[in-house]
């Protein structure tokens, strides 16, 4: 049942762009909480009402807390609709749209109660014919046609104003006019209370004007301190954004890679899209166009900028200076910068990949992990590694021996099996060691240890899902240790099965 006056006020709103695995808080306040059986009904919708895929995701009921506020944490309801895009075979474009990484959503608020009490401060008249009621602070919950009961405070001048009346005009959200006949003015302001005569449950839809109820959530999770200082406007990358605008990248924007690595860095797309990327290497300066305008659930791009990504891309590259290929065996660095519509002006930060190929007698183990803001970054461990294999057997016992019908004896053979294995599962645990690394690289290792999605790259370039089994580690500092390295253990996310006897 819609109404004119907005009763619920949104006291705290979520950030416009928010990491979904952190709290996403809305605080509601309403003068109607004094009503019987009061509750808020909050609907969560995918997208906006003007979009084709707009749909109801869930409905939650919120009761006032002891302080009288409605507090909602949306993130548990939103995170089930967000995942990650991991498609190493998708090598078509350097900068491509993704939709699994985020959810654009809105919320609507209704109030429900079985009766309502509204305190007014004075009577109100118009043209000297009918009397109504007004308040300077409390918004009424009524609509035209409501039958209400008026109880004036003791000492009221006109007792005839008490009793039932029908709301005939909603003047504004603080004032209504009724069908009660006006008698005369009163010497002072005379207040009282009113309530709906109909005590059945009713629902009042609240009007929350867009964009205050529009939120972009993405697959990020920040530490407590980082989340307190999170500013979404630092990440709004557009055709005209500042050159300091950030990618969705946790940590530094300069790190080491190899020529065999992929690097996937996400960015938030504002309403107007940045038009391309500048790629600078030892061989020159090149640009590649980005053609996706953010619409619907597309508001994140994934920029595949590793040496392996660039070599496999079928994009068309424009040479600004130097000559193709962009990357070769002599490449020592790759710099990526987002550009405006003319592909000339930076509209975001520069990410620098320092290409380092370290020689080692040991097998290189190339990790690929999702960082705290949803981007995928590589780390290589190229020192000693060991593999431990654990078999888990499921056995049953059976009687052995057999009856020989010719000799009429019960006989035994050496190959009879009394204990039989009917299931054998093999688990491999690999322990590996990094080279000596910087403190900045150490932070990336720790980020990988905290990541839920980690892969290793096989010798033929395939990515294999793993689970890190190192659950305790030291955050190493060069001030304490002049040389830093890490030893970690992991197992394949899928176990190996064997024959059954």
Image (tube, helix red, strand yellow):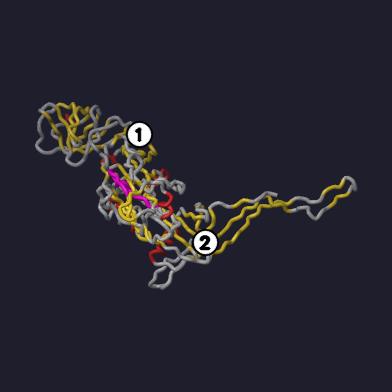
Q: Which residue is mark 2?
A: 489
Residue corresponding to mark 1 = 52
| Secondary structure of residue under mark 1 | loop
Q: Earlier in the sequence, mark 2 or mark 1?
A: 1
Q: Position of residue 396 (x, y in %)?
A: 70, 51
Q: Position of residue 430 (x, y in %)?
A: 54, 61
Judged from this view, the residue extending furthest toward the right is 407
Q: In percent of the image, x 11 and y 38: which residue is there?
A: 188
> Circle 1: is it few (<14), some (14-19), or many (20+) Cα within 10 Å?
few
Residue at 56% over, 59% down: 429
Which contiguous range is marked in magenta? 264-276
* Tag count: 2
Picture residue at 78% right of the left edge, 52% below the top: 416
The quadrant where residue 155 appears: top left
Few, some or many C-alpha atoms within 10 Å of disc 2 (few <14, some 14-19, many ≥20)?
some
Magenta stretch encompasses residue 313: no
- The residue lying toward the viewer, choosing from 422 and 331, is 331
């Amino acid at each position: 049942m819609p109404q004119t006056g907005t009763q619920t006020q949104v006291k705290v709103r979520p950030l416009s762009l928010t990491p979904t695995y952190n709290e996403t808080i809305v605080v509601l306040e309403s003068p109607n909480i004094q009503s019987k059986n009061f509750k808020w009904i909050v609907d969560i919708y995918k997208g906006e009402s003007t979009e084709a895929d707009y749909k109801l995701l869930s409905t939650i009921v919120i009761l006032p807390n002891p302080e009288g506020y409605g507090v909602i944490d949306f993130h548990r309801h939103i995170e089930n609709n967000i995942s990650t895009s991991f498609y190493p075979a998708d090598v078509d474009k350097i900068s491509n749209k993704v939709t699994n990484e985020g959810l654009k959503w809105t919320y609507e608020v209704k109030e429900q109660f079985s009766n309502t009490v509204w305190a007014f401060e004075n009577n109100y008249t118009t043209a000297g014919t009918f009397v109504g009621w007004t308040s300077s602070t409390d918004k009424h919950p009524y609509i035209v046609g409501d039958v209400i009961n008026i109880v004036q405070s003791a000492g009221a001048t006109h007792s005839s104003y008490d009793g039932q009346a029908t709301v005939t005009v909603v003047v504004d959200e603080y004032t209504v006019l009724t069908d009660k006949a006006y008698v005369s003015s009163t010497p002072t302001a005379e207040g009282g209370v009113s309530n709906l005569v109909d005590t059945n449950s009713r629902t009042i839809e609240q009007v929350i004007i867009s964009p205050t109820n529009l939120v972009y959530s993405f697959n990020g999770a920040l530490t407590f301190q980082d989340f307190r200082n999170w500013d979404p406007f630092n990440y709004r990358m557009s055709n005209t954004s500042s050159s300091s605008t950030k990618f969705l990248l946790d940590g530094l924007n300069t790190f080491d890679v190899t020529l065999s690595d992929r690097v996937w860095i996400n960015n938030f797309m504002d309403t107007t899209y940045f038009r391309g990327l500048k790629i600078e290497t030892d061989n020159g300066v090149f640009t590649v166009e980005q053609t996706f305008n953010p619409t619907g659930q597309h508001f994140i791009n994934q920029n595949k900028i590793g040496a392996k990504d660039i070599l496999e891309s079928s994009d068309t590259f424009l040479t600004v200076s130097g000559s193709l290929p962009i990357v070769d065996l002599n490449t020592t660095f790759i710099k990526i910068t987002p550009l405006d519509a003319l592909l000339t002006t930076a509209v975001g930060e520069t990410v620098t990949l320092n290409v380092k190929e370290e020689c080692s007698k040991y097998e290189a183990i190339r990790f690929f992990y999702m960082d705290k803001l949803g981007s995928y970054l590589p780390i290589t461990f190229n020192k000693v590694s060991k593999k431990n294999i654990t078999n888990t057997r499921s056995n049953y016992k059976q009687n052995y021996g057999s009856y020989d019908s010719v000799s009429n004896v019960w006989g035994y053979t050496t190959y009879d099996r009394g204990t039989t294995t009917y299931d054998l599962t093999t688990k491999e645990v690999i322990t590996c060691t990094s080279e000596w690394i910087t403190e900045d690289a150490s932070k990336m290792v720790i980020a990988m240890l905290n990541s839920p999605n980690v892969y290793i790259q096989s010798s033929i370039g395939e990515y294999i899902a793993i689970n890190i089994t190192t659950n305790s580690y030291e955050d190493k500092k060069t001030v304490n240790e002049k040389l830093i390295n890490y030893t970690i253990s992991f197992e394949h996310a899928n176990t190996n099965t064997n024959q059954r006897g």
